[in-house]
Structure formats: structure tokens, C-alpha cells
């Protein structure tokens, strides 16, 4: 009798029955089957008891208060970044409409970075996303050969680079690599840092910045965020996926370290 | 915030469930919260581009599961891979210890399940995700979810009945770890 297809029930169906996920027709069929197969019926009953025990066991886990660090993600104003950005965009549009071209022109150099500078965090973020995920070869030259790394990249970028130490921020240098910059024949260097949780930051340094020095700016694209600035013909971007709040003090440390 | 009154974000209400799921995955409170923090940041960053057809909870669980997997891959220094829970799933304790272990405690028994089995039980039985949603969270085919769930249930049943876990686990033979 058990070979009759109408009379067989699969383990998947028994589970779906125990979980109450079957449509009514199938449920009736399984119920009829369970009347004949006491072994299967015992199994289903055991699963249901087990589910009840699990529900009781896990119910307690929901009562704990939410840790402050998590709640802070939702209460800190910056976390409305998207809303803020949209608000700023609307505000910018209104501003231009109301104040006209003059204000727009005046505001352009002041508020918005030049296209080349705006490309800096994008380049840095792309490089960050590619290499920070790399398990086997995150860097070309590791921190064990720090002096060699610094000499090499300094030579290629045409300046005496110094690698900022971020140990006070909990990040150790992993190493670095050479990259092509997006404009001209310029090169870029990427230094990678990692903290004890395995979160990685990259410092991207680009040569050939024609424009004047800029202030400290923030850019966020997808999971990654970057602080960037131009100083003395070089563009710098610190990129990470730790969120703006965690990134800011590190970026400040880098900025102070490099522009001193 | 200047432009809006503060209303609770829909994700906030899910935090306790995310923490519970992360704890079931990691079995370590501090690590679990670290993973949840990471998950929340990613979810918030992706919030604007989230497609609405997927319901919130499975979406968040999927992000959390991915965060945990990539972190484990990074810390283990090995490429991300599905755990071989279908083969080498037994805890590497020698047989004699089992008789002396009191496995009535459900938490102890859960700790002996492979991580993917334990988290799947939570997703389906506790969180009420559909089998399809659970398959998306774990990034495996539906058939794998059903067989994994079956193994989880049967193994947990044997553990809480106090039986040694290696008796008749499956119809097919096991590769056993040699110590």
C-alpha cells in the first residue's frame, strides 16, 4: 500500500505539516496518512513538541534592552544621511532658482568640489571596495616591509610619503599598493589598515591635483564612506565601511598627521 | 534633525530579533552585537535602494547572515564557503563523553548543532519565515533547506533525548573526523 503514490508522504511534506505550512488539501492528505503510519505520526508530534520548546527557549531573548550603540544609529542626526542629502539637494535647487545664476556660480566653487576633486572619493571607494574584500592579496607590499613600501610608493608618486600611524585609533597597517589614478599619467597609492574586528580602512593618495587645497569633505556611496581633501597637489581619501561616525576621528587623525 | 520629527525607523523594531538571530549564529554575545551593528549600518546605507517587494525581516536576516559569513571568512583567513554541514558536522568529541553529558538542556543541545542548522531552526520555527525566505537568507536551494531542517530536527531530538549524536544520523555513511 505504501507504494501507492497517493499514499506516500515525503519528509518535506511531514515537516510542512508540522510547521502548518501546507494548503488545506495537502493537510488532509497528510492527516489521513498519519492515521496509518504511527511512526510518522510520532515523529511529527515530536517535532511539534520540539518547536514549542524552542519557542519557549527563544522567547526570553527578545526582552533585552537595545544597546546604546545600536540605538544611536537611529537617533543621531547623521543617520538621516539620505534625507539630509535629499534636503540639501532640494535646498540647492531652490537656492539656485531663487538667487539665480550669480548665486549658483558663486556657490559652485564654494560648496561643490570641482569634477576632478569629486572623482577622488569615487576612485578611492572603488579601490577600497575591490581590495578591502581581498582575503589572500589585499596588498602588494605588506607592513612587514614598511620602509620598502614607503620608499617605493614615494618614488612613484613623486613625493616623500609618510604613512600615518593609526594605532591610537585601533588600526594597524596591513600594507599598500600602487594604482593608476583616473587622470593623466598620474599614480595613486593605497594604504590598507585593519582593526581587531577585521574592519578595513584604506587611505588613498593621488598625485597630480591641479586645483587649490580644499577643506575636509565627506562622501558616501553604498556601503562605503570617505573623507577626502586636497593638500599641496595631492588628493587624499580615507575610505571605510564603518559608518561616518567611526570614520571621522580616524580621518581627522590622518589629516592632522599628513598636513602637519 | 531639522526637517523631520523623529519617528521610529522600521528597522529599529527588528533589532531584538536581529540580536537573537546573531546570537544563535555566533553563540557569543559580544560578537553577535558586533555583527548586528554592522548589519544595521549596511541596512541603513541600503535602505533608500531597497526594493519593496521583499519583506523587511527576511531582508535584514539576509544582510546579517552575509555580514557574519564574510566576517567568519575573513577571520578564518579562508575563502567564504558553505560549511560542510552535510558531511563533517559532528562536534569532534569522542564517543565516550556523550553518555556522561546531560543533554537535556536545550541550549547545550543547540550549541552542538552545526551553525547553519541552528540558525535555520530559528528562522523557520521561531521567526516564521517561509522555507523559500529561509533559503534566500542562507543562500541555498529550497531542497537544501528542507533536508537541513530535517537533519536539524532529528539531531536536536536525539540530543535532547540524551542519545549520542552519532547513532544513525543519516541513512548514508559519514566521513568522520580522525583525531
Image (cartoon, rainbow, N blue to C red):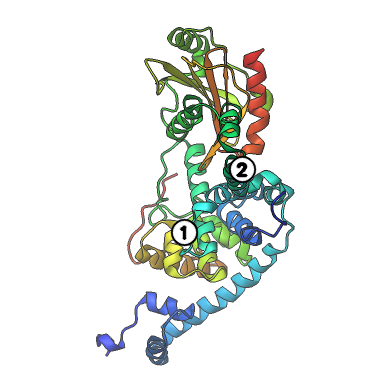
Q: Are marks 2 and 1 on the same chain?
A: no
Q: Quadrant of residue A219?
A: top right
- The residue under label 1 is B51
Q: Nearer the viewer, residue B88 or B46?
A: B46
Residue A68 image offset from top left, x and y in percent: 74, 49
Residue A191 image offset from top left, x and y in percent: 51, 22
Numbered label attached to residue A70:
none
Q: Chain of mark 2?
A: A
**Quadrant that contains the C terminus of chain B:** top left
Residue B137 image offset from top left, x and y in percent: 46, 58
Q: Quadrant of residue A172?
A: top right
Give me the residue at 62% from left, 67% from top.
B104
Residue A166 image offset from top left, x and y in percent: 63, 23
Q: Is residue A41 left or right of residue A237?
A: left
Callout 1 secondary element:
loop
Asked if the residue at tag 1 contacts the one at tag 2, i.e. Cβ–Cβ closer than 8 Å, the answer is no
Compared to A223, does A62 lie above or below?
below
Compared to A5, does B177 lie above or below?
above
Q: CA distance from mark 2 to mark 1?
A: 35 Å
Q: Nearer the viewer, residue A246 or A220?
A: A220
Compared to B125, does B13 lie above or below?
above
Instruction: Please indicate, yes or no, whether residue B151 appears anywhere in the rendered image.
Output: no
User: Callout 1: 10 Å neighbours few (<14), some, many (20+)?
Assistant: few
- The residue under label 2 is A98
Give me the residue at 63% from left, 46% from top.
A84
Amino acid at each position: 500500500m505504501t507504494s501507492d503514490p497517493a499514499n506516500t508522504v515525503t519528509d518535506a511534506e511531514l515537516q510542512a505539516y508540522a510547521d502548518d505550512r501546507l494548503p488545506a488539501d495537502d493537510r488532509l492528505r497528510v492527516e489521513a496518512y498519519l492515521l496509518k503510519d504511527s511512526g510518522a505520526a510520532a515523529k511529527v508530534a515530536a517535532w511539534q513538541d520540539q518547536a514549542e520548546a524552542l519557542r519557549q527557549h527563544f522567547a526570553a531573548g527578545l526582552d533585552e534592552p537595545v544597546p546604546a550603540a545600536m540605538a544611536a544609529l537611529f537617533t543621531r542626526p547623521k543617520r538621516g544621511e539620505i534625507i539630509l542629502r535629499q534636503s540639501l539637494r532640494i535646498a540647492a535647487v531652490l537656492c539656485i532658482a531663487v538667487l539665480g545664476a550669480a548665486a549658483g556660480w558663486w556657490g559652485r566653487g564654494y560648496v561643490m568640489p570641482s569634477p576632478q576633486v569629486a572623482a577622488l572619493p569615487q576612485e578611492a571607494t572603488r579601490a577600497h571596495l575591490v581590495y578591502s574584500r581581498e582575503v589572500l592579496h589585499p596588498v602588494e607590499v605588506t607592513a612587514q616591509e614598511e620602509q620598502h613600501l614607503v620608499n617605493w610608493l614615494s618614488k612613484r608618486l613623486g613625493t616623500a610619503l609618510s604613512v600615518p600611524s593609526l594605532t591610537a585609533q585601533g588600526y594597524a597597517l596591513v600594507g599598500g599598493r600602487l594604482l593608476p589614478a583616473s587622470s593623466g599619467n598620474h599614480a595613486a597609492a593605497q594604504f590598507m589598515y585593519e582593526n581587531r574586528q577585521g574592519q578595513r580602512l584604506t587611505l588613498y593618495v593621488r598625485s597630480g591635483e591641479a586645483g587649490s587645497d580644499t577643506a575636509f569633505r565627506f562622501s558616501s556611496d553604498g556601503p562605503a564612506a570617505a573623507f577626502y581633501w586636497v593638500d599641496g597637489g595631492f588628493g587624499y581619501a580615507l575610505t571605510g565601511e564603518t559608518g561616518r561616525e567611526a570614520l571621522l576621528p580616524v580621518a581627522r587623525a590622518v589629516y592632522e598627521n599628513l598636513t602637519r | 534633525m531639522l526637517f523631520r520629527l523623529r519617528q521610529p525607523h522600521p528597522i529599529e523594531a527588528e533589532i531584538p530579533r536581529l540580536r537573537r538571530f546573531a546570537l544563535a549564529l555566533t553563540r557569543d554575545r559580544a560578537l553577535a552585537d558586533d555583527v548586528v551593528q554592522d548589519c544595521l549600518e549596511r541596512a541603513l546605507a541600503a535602505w533608500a535602494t531597497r526594493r519593496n517587494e521583499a519583506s523587511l525581516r527576511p531582508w535584514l536576516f539576509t544582510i546579517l547572515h552575509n555580514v557574519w559569513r564574510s566576517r567568519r571568512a575573513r577571520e578564518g583567513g579562508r575563502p567564504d564557503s558553505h560549511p560542510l554541514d552535510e558531511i563533517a558536522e559532528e562536534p569532534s568529541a569522542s564517543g565516550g563523553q556523550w553518555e556522561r553529558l546531560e543533554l537535556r538542556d536545550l541550549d547545550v543541545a543547540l550549541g552542538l548543532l552545526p551553525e547553519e542548522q541552528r540558525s535555520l531552526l530559528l528562522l523557520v520555527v521561531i521567526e516564521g519565515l517561509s522555507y523559500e525566505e529561509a533559503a534566500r537568507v542562507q543562500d541555498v536551494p529550497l531542497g537544501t533547506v528542507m533536508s537541513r531542517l530535517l537533519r536539524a530536527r532529528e539531531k536536536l531530538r536525539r540530543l535532547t533525548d540524551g542519545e549520542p549524536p552519532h547513532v544513525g544520523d543519516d541513512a548514508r555513511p559519514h566521513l568522520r573526523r580522525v583525531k
